[in-house]
Image (spheres, rainbow, N blue to C red):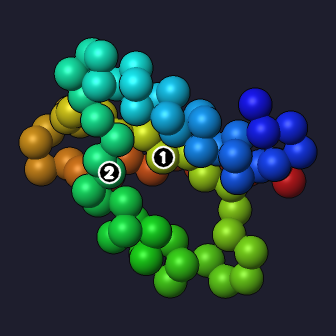
Amino acid sequence: MGKGDARAQARQVFQNMRGVLEAAGGDLRIEDRPAVAAVRSEVFSGELPASTLMVVKQLFHPDFLVEIEGVAAV
């Protein structure tokens, strides 16, 4: 799908994800992503490091909205 076209491939992946999530009663809404992205841009200058965003129904405590994990190679 979308050979040589990263945009088409990403679009297909999200369509696949949406289909699987909807079949399981979920969706692709990531309500807190803009807030987290804004803070990352404040903390890091220049090119942003790689990151993974995962949304879960609930963390350990209902007040915890973000879990951040970091991996560094020196």
**Element type at mark 2:** loop
Pinpoint residue 50: horizontal percent, then vertical percent.
Answer: 68, 55
Pinpoint residue 56: horizontal percent, then vertical percent.
Answer: 30, 34
Say left or right for 24 vs 10: left
Instruction: Kindly identify which residue carries mark 2.
Output: 30
Residue at the top extreme of this rendering: 24
Tell me the quarter of the image containing the N terminus. Answer: top right
Q: Amino acid at mark 2?
A: Ile
Q: Residues within 10 Å of mark 2 (few under 14, many from 20)?
A: few
Please report contact status of discs 2 and 1: CB closer than 8 Å, yes or no. yes
Instruction: Please say if 1 is above or below 42.
Output: above
Please give the name of the residue rendered at 43% of the width and 77% of the height, measured from the top-left corner. Answer: 38
Say left or right for 5 vs 70: right
N-term-proximal mark, 2 vs 1: 2
C-alpha separation, residue under disc 2 versus residue under disc 1: 9 Å
Say left or right for 68 vs 25: right
Residue at the left extreme of this rendering: 62
Please give the name of the residue rendered at 37% of the width and 68% of the height, measured from the top-left corner. Answer: 34
Q: Which mark is residue 61?
A: none
Q: Residues within 10 Å of mark 1 (few under 14, many from 20)?
A: few
Pinpoint residue 12: horizontal percent, then vertical percent.
Answer: 60, 36
Say left or right for 25 vs 66: left
Please give the name of the residue rendered at 61% of the width and 77% of the height, measured from the top-left corner. Answer: 44
Q: Amino acid at mark 1?
A: Leu
Pinpoint residue 51: horizontal percent, then vertical percent.
Answer: 61, 52
Instruction: Please say if 73 is above or below 14.
Output: below
Please give the name of the residue rendered at 68% of the width and 69% of the height, measured from the top-left corner. Answer: 48
Image quadrant assignment for residue 21 = top left
Instruction: Kindly identify which residue carries mark 1.
Output: 53
**Element type at mark 1:** loop
- Residue nearest the viewer, comparing 69 with 46: 46
